[in-house]
Amino acid sequence: RPRRRSRRETLDPRLADRLERARVDGDLPPETDCEALAAYVAAITQGMAVQAKAGAGKPKLDAIVAHALSVWPTTPQSS
């Protein structure tokens, strides 16, 4: 019986594809590794889910998001 793909297994490639379109459109720097960036986003969101389940409040989760966005690759026109 074929194993069903998990949501995570299907989300990462779709997100990488979307990030690649953003890179091609100039919304991300040309040197952006879209697969690594998609994995980063997945790791952050999965980690946030664990934190939330463990009782982290909105301020802590908002701080995680703020930090993740502070290291997001930007292009000169989007800075």
Image (cartoon, rainbow, N blue to C red):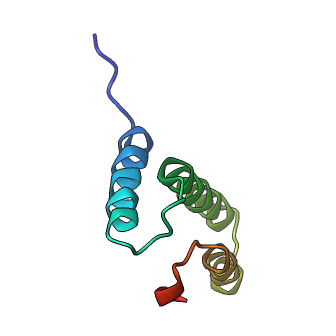
* Vertical relation: 23 (above or below) 61: above
Q: Which residue is nearer to you in this view: 29 or 49?
A: 29
Q: Residue at x 38, y 48 (%)?
A: 11
What residue occupies the far left of the structure in this picture? 1
Residue 37 at x, y percent in the picture: 54, 57
Q: Is residue 2 left or right of residue 23?
A: left
* Vertical relation: 59 (above or below) 17: below
Of the 4 image quadrants, the one containing the C terminus is bottom right
* Vertical relation: 40 (above or below) 60: above
Q: Residue at x 34, y 63 (%)?
A: 24
Residue 43 at x, y percent in the picture: 61, 54
Q: Is residue 77 left or right of residue 36?
A: left
Determine the image quadrant of residue 67: bottom right
Of the 4 image quadrants, the one containing the N terminus is top left
* Vertical relation: 38 (above or below) 65: above
Q: Which residue is nearer to you in this view: 9 or 18?
A: 18
